[in-house]
Amino acid sequence: MTCCLPSRQMYNFRVYGMDCAEETNALRRELSRLIESEDDLQFDLLGGRLSVLPKDNVSIAEILAAIARTGLRATPIQQTEETDTIAQPSKLHRYDRRVWFCLFSGIATGVAAIFSASRLFLDLNETQHLVLLVLSRGFCGIGALFGMWFVFPRAINAAVRLRPDMNLLMTVAVIGAVILGEWIEAASVSFLFALSLVLESWSVDRARRAVSALLQLAPVTARCRNDQDNEYTERPINEVAAGTIVSVWPGEKVPLDGVVTQGVTSINEAPITGESLPVEKSCGAEVFAGTLNLQGSFEFRVTRTAHDTTLARIVHMIEEAQSRRAPTERWVDAFARWYTPTMMVLALFVALIPPLFFRAAWAPWLYESLVLLVIACPCALIISTPVSIVAGLTSAARAGVLIKGGAYLEAASRLRAVALDKTGTLTLGRPEVQRIVPLNGHTEQELLARAAALESHSDHPLALAILRKAKETGIVFDRAEGFRALPGQGGVGIIAGREFWIGSHRLLLERAKTEEHILD
């Protein structure tokens, strides 16, 4: 029995094994006749989800059948099912096979190249030449087989549907190279194409890990106050409604977005805002999920639920960015739609026209047509696009910069000017000691040693910066005794029997009112 979808309603599907552009391109081709425009398809590689806005009277069975024709398996996501989760970054079985097959292809191709080179540079007899030739071609065949293992089924599917694509052209090129006797060429092309597919899968897996780490910034529970008895209970953040009062202790992460209602503290907001210095918070100040409470306890009123926090919106933006292809990738797809059939028709003309109309021999022109297919194989174009984008995104991520997708990465090539924020600086998200200014005859080493002795009791970002500076300069110090933190201001401790304090400019002004020799 076929169940028809309501008119023009978006439906979500969980697609298993959708982890690279090849799968999304195949799905886009198969589903194109079931939708009105390309915008009616939305792909979420990180979550392994597909959203379809079908035409009127298109059934779920038709959509699932179209997905199945690409070799993928899908299940509908119910409206009550949680859809704001990221697919686990653990490597899937299919992804593991892709890596191993690529590795086997590379090893076999390398061994074949060694045997082939040995025939050229070693003084061998005819029998030895023949043995090395057989071994070289045998390993080339193994390399090509493993390299094209996941490509052959797609090529056959494209040929059956009369929709030639890059997979079909790659397959014909590899077979043509074998027929021409260019076994090393066939194995090399197969290995490089398999490597490009692995790199695409690896980039998605890396993005999943990055987003999973981002999601882990926020705790899974919140300490909520009950209105009836003013007691505090732990609740999952998904069950906390807006308006609930939540308590956060020193060293804990803020579970949800809200506004401070009681208490004074400082919060490290670097993971969300990029601000390297802690931000002082008091009544009326806004706090964000995933930020770290450094000092005092405080309470805040929840203003956004778990699925609407600033952190959740950042994750959602990343998910959407993954479904948008870079301009170069879109151009390659459009190019492939015309290039592949054009090259195959041209090769057919080369093979048929001279023998049929000019009475030329069949064998030479068949050979020339195969040469044309091998030369026309767009291996470099196919490989360069995902590899370059992956390399750029990975390099940026390693430097602490999260770029939302290839489109934004390519936009950087068109920049003519860069505008910075009001501070005019770019930061690494953590403070560093830039200069030490001792007064009243004290030395830099003495001042740094006393500051480090006091800050050794704190995990404040400024304290950690001072400790790093002391370690870099080789300063030896003993931890201060009787250290006492001054929330929002600094701290006080005993060094060599004398009280010292360290803190903000505000603390300096307050102490100056009561101490005559404040700078001694």
Image (cartoon, rainbow, N blue to C red):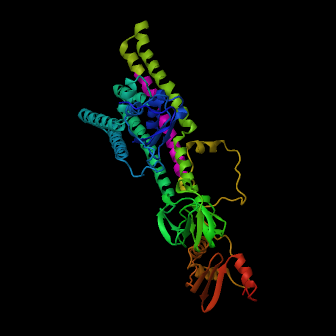
Residues 455 and 300: in front is 300
Tell me, yes or no, if residue 95 can be seen here.
yes
In the displayed structure, does residue 406 sit left or right of residue 167? right
Residue 501 x/y as whole percent: 65, 83
- Classify 144 as above or below 490: above
Q: What residue sits 41% from the left and 35% below the top?
A: 189
Residues 519 and 17: in front is 17
- Classify 463 as above or below 410: below
Residues 340 and 89: in front is 89
Residue located farthest toward the left when viewing the structure as drawn: 127
Highlighted magenta segment, given as a residue range: 370-395
Residue 62 x/y as whole percent: 40, 30
- Classify 512 as above or below 324: below
Residue located farthest toward the front when viewing the structure as drawn: 228
- The quarter in which the N terminus is drawn is top left
Q: Main secondary structure of the magenta part?
A: helix
Is 375 colored magenta in this rendering? yes
Is 157 colored magenta in this rendering? no
Q: What residue sits 72% from the left and 87% below the top?
A: 520
In the displayed structure, does residue 61 sit left or right of residue 431? left
Tell me, yes or no, if residue 431 can be seen here.
no
In the displayed structure, does residue 165 sit left or right of residue 277? left
In the displayed structure, does residue 438 sit left or right of residue 60? right
Residue 293 x/y as whole percent: 57, 69
